[in-house]
Amino acid sequence: MKKLYLFTFAVLLLRFDAAAQIPVTDVAGFAQDTANEVLNLAEYIEMVSNQVEQINSLTQQLQQVTAYVKAFGDPSSLLEITGVSGLVADLQQSGVGQTIGELQQLASGVEALKANANGLYGSITDITSSGINVPRPEELYRKFAAVDRTTENYTTVYDDVVSRRKALKGQMVATAQQLQSASTDAETQKLSGVLASQGAELQALDSEVGFAASQALVQDIANRADAQKQENAHNEEIAADRHDALKKAGSMLVPDVTSDILQEMSNRK
C-alpha cells in the first residue's frame, strides 16, 4: 500500500513538472495585437483603394484630353496653314502708287506739251509767228503735266491691284477648300482667321485704286481752282488798266484854263 502511495505521488509529481513546462499564453495581448494587425491591414487596403481610384481618375482625364485633342486638334502643331505665306507676302508689299506731292514734283511742262495719251490726243507744238517757231512757256503747262502724272499713276496702281487681286482670290479659293476638309476645330479656327484676313486684304487693295483715283481728282480740282484764280487776277488787271485809261482820257478832255487866266491878269495890268 505504501508503495502504491509512493507511485501515485511520483506520477503526480511528474505531471506537475510537465505542466510547469507548458508555456503560458497572454490571450488579451494576443487579441490586441491581432486587432492592430487587422486595423493596419484595413488602412493599407483603403490606401491602395484610394490610389487605384486616383489612377483611374487620371486615366479618365488622360482619355478625355486625348479625345479633345483628337476632336479639336492641337493648335501648336498647326505650323503650315494654307494661305498664310501668300497673305504675309502680299501684306509686305508697299504698292506702286506715289503720293500727290511726288507726282507734282515730277511734273514737267515738256511732258505735258508732248503727251498725247497713246495717240488719243494731239501734241502741242511750238507757236509759229512769221515763219519762226516760238517755244511755249513750259512752266505754264506743269499743272497739266501733274494731271497726266496722277492719271498715269492711277493706271499703274489699277493694273498692279488687278494682278494682286487675282492672285489673292486664288489663295482665298485654296483656303476655302482647305477649310471644307478641315478635320479639327483648331485647324478650322486658324483657316477661318486666314480667310477673314484675306478678305480684309482684298478690300485694302480696292482702296488703293480709290486712293489713286482721288489723287487725279484732287489735282484736277486744283487745276480748275488755279484756272479760276488766274482768270480773276487777269480780270482785275484788265479792270485796273481800263481805270487808268479812263483816267488819262478824262484828263485830256478837261480844258486848260490856266493860260487864259494868266493872259487876262496880264491885260489888266
Image: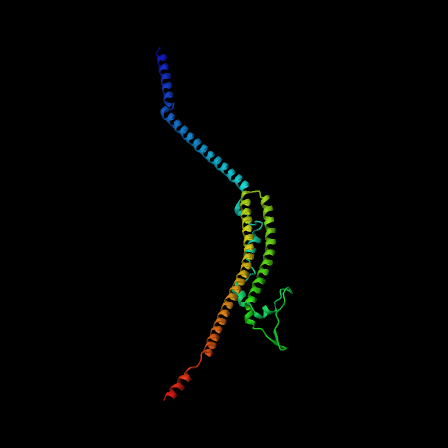
* Whole-percent x, y for residue 207 in the image: 54, 55
Q: Compared with residue 89, is residue 137 higher up or lower down, i.e. above or below?
A: below
Q: Residue furthest top?
A: 1
Tell me: 122 left or right of 193: right
Residue visible at 56% across and 63% down in the picture: 150
Q: Residue furthest front?
A: 268
How many numbered discs? 0
Tell me the colour scheme of the image: rainbow
* Whole-percent x, y for residue 88 in the image: 55, 54
Q: Compared with residue 175, is residue 140 higher up or lower down, i.e. above or below?
A: below
* Whole-percent x, y for residue 6 in the image: 35, 14
Q: Nearer the viewer, residue 110 or 226?
A: 226
Q: Quadrant of the C terminus?
A: bottom left
Q: Quadrant of the N terminus?
A: top left
* Whole-percent x, y for residue 248 in the image: 47, 77
Q: Nearer the viewer, residue 1 or 12?
A: 12
Residue visible at 60% across and 69% down in the picture: 113
Residue visible at 55% across and 46% down in the picture: 192
Tell me: 181 left or right of 250: right
Q: Compared with residue 38, is residue 105 higher up or lower down, i.e. above or below?
A: below
Q: Nearer the viewer, residue 241 or 92?
A: 241
Q: Quadrant of residue 265?
A: bottom left
Q: Quadrant of residue 117?
A: bottom right
Q: Residue furthest bottom?
A: 269
Q: Residue furthest right?
A: 119
Residue 94 shows up from this direction: no
Q: Compared with residue 113, is residue 155 higher up or lower down, i.e. above or below?
A: above
Residue 217 shows up from this direction: yes
Q: Quadrant of residue 135?
A: bottom right
Q: Nearer the viewer, residue 210 or 192?
A: 210
